[in-house]
Amino acid sequence: MTFAYEDFEVGSTVQLSGHTFLREEIIEFASRFDPQPFHMSEEGGVASPFGELVASGWHTCSAMMGILVRDRLSGSTSMGSPGLDNIRWIKPVRVNDTVRLSVSVLSKRISASKPDRGLVSTRWEAHNQHGDLVLTVDSSAIFGLREPGKPR
């Protein structure tokens, strides 16, 4: 059965998988998308307030998006997203940190103009292997209804 709008329950939280941030991957991502010194080398990290090489926040967001797609959205009725809000990089993600994602459903509503789909608002929380919160994101996504027009 395809995961659809109807399957989201307001107040529910799902625990998804994680991603380990390896040194080479941190540097490769940074060299392509966020070439700040503290993301590019140990030396740059040591000279920064972080004191060591750290992953770009955008790298962390991208990795969490990959987890969300693989663990939850693949094969769903997802129609994309109108955007993200309140991205917060709370703690740095360091080399060899494993960050796990949880997603909580904040609200949902059927579209008034397109009643075959609905908008689901969620909060992502990413924690490292020590249980420290490293990232939060508020997200909205559009999902098709399994049975449009059925009373809810």
Image (cartoon, rainbow, N blue to C red):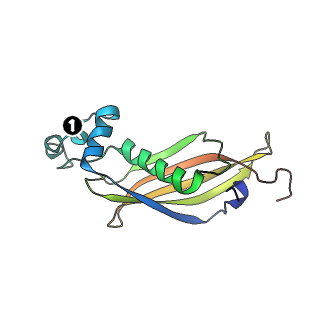
The residue carrying mark 1 is 37
Q: Residues within 10 Å of mark 1 (few under 14, many from 20)?
A: some
Query: In which quadrant is the C terminus drawn?
Result: bottom right
Q: Position of residue 91 (x, y in %)?
A: 32, 54
* Kind of element beneath mark 1: helix
Image quarter (top left, top right, bottom left or bottom right) of the N terminus: bottom right
How many marks can you see? 1
Where residue 98 appears, x then y in whole percent? 34, 59
Closer to the camera in the image, 103 or 20: 20
Q: Is residue 10 left or right of residue 101?
A: right
Q: Residue at x 45, y 51 (%)?
A: 64
From the viewer's side, name the closer residue of 123 and 99: 99
Task: Give x and y (percent) for residue 133.
Answer: 38, 60
Taking the spot 22% from the left edge, 41% from the top edge, the residue there is: 38
Image-based side of 142 in relation to 138, left or right: right
**What amino acid type should be assigned to the residue bearing mark 1?**
Pro
Toward the viewer: 105 or 16?
16
128 relative to 15 in the view: left or right: left
Q: Quadrant of residue 43?
A: top left
